[in-house]
Image (cartoon, rainbow, N blue to C red):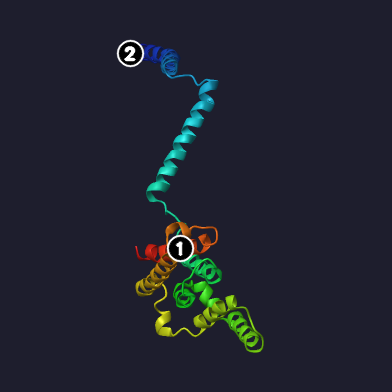
Amino acid sequence: MLTLTHTLFSSATSTSSFPTLHCRLKTHVHSLNSHRSAHLPTPTSLQLFNPLRTAVENRGNLGMKQKWKRGFGPVCYSPPVTTSNLQWICTISAAVLMFAKGTAIQKSFIVPFFALQAPASLTSWIKGEYGILTAFLALLVRLFFSIPGELELPFIALLMVIVFPFQLANLRGRQEGVALSLIIAAFLAFQHFTRLGNLRGAFDQGSIIATLAILSIVAVPIMLLI
């Protein structure tokens, strides 16, 4: 009887203390959460949206992207002075020299120089349908009519490009062809400056265009050889 009473008393005591223990555990967990939240920084409106920090981060990301592009991205660079551009300058200068009047050079040397330095796009057009048709019409005009002497050299240069041998056409754009063009240009420059007498006469109003053309056809092969 005594044992049964002690057992019932112990059960009642443990049953009655269970809510108290549960309340104590709940209070302890709440106090721990409060302590932890007290040490964490509370997000403010400035921390949620800070335009200065956003701008700095965006600038940093942009700098990293630009650095990546400079370091690893493909670099596309088109130089302003190419072989084709230099050949066009040389060809235009030779054409101007055909019509220039303030010089005493042997202009027949300009024709092989023109054929050697003409760019590929121009030679393909001259050897094409329209170029051959132009040469044919010029030949008909030359046969039945008299044309000015200034147009003789352009017409001969057109025919020279059309009938240029394959072995000599291969020299166009190569070091051998550039060296041969430089020899022709140097000879023309020697004739131009020696027959004018001095440098002052070469830069007179009547000779300055021919002088600039001579300097161009000399400078371009030198630049192509470098």
The answer to whether 152 appears left or right of 225 in the picture is: right
Residue type at tag 2: Thr
Quadrant assignment for the N terminus:
top left
Residue where numbered disc 2 is placed:
3
| 141 to 83, vertically: above or below | below
From what the image shows, is residue 57 above or below residue 140?
A: above
Question: Would you identify the image quadrant in which residue 3 lies?
Answer: top left
Q: Which of marks 2 and 1 is nearer the N terminus?
A: 2
Please, what is the three-letter code of the amino acid marked with disc 1? Ser
Can residue 65 be seen from the camera position used here? yes
* Image position of 176 with respect to 45: above or below: below
Q: Say few, some or many: other residues with alpha carbon within 10 Å of mark 1 (under 14 / 14 to 19 / 20 or more).
A: many
Q: Nearer the viewer, residue 137 or 169?
A: 137
Taking depth in this image into account, of 80 and 145 the one nearest to the observer is: 145
Residue 127 visible in image: no
Residue 148 in the figure: left or right of residue 216: right
> Which residue matches tag 1?
216
Q: Kindly give the residue lying farthest to the front in the view shown.
A: 197
Q: For the view shown, which residue lies furthest in the right direction?
A: 145
Per the rendering, the mark at residue 102 is: none
Q: Where is residue 207 in the image (x, y as percent from the top left)?
A: 52, 62
Q: How crowded is mark 2: few (under 14 residues within 10 Å), some or many (20 or more)?
A: few
Return the x and y of residue 219 as percentages of the image width and height. Answer: 41, 62
Give the spatial CA distance, label 2 vs label 1: 127 Å
**Which x, y percent locates residue 7?**
36, 15
Q: In which quarter of the image is the C terminus?
A: bottom left
Question: Could you tell me which residue is drawn at 58 percent across and 75 percent down?
Answer: 150
Q: Residue at x 54, y 79 (%)?
A: 158
Residue 80 placed where, x, y %? 47, 57
Position of 3 with respect to 59 (left or right) is left
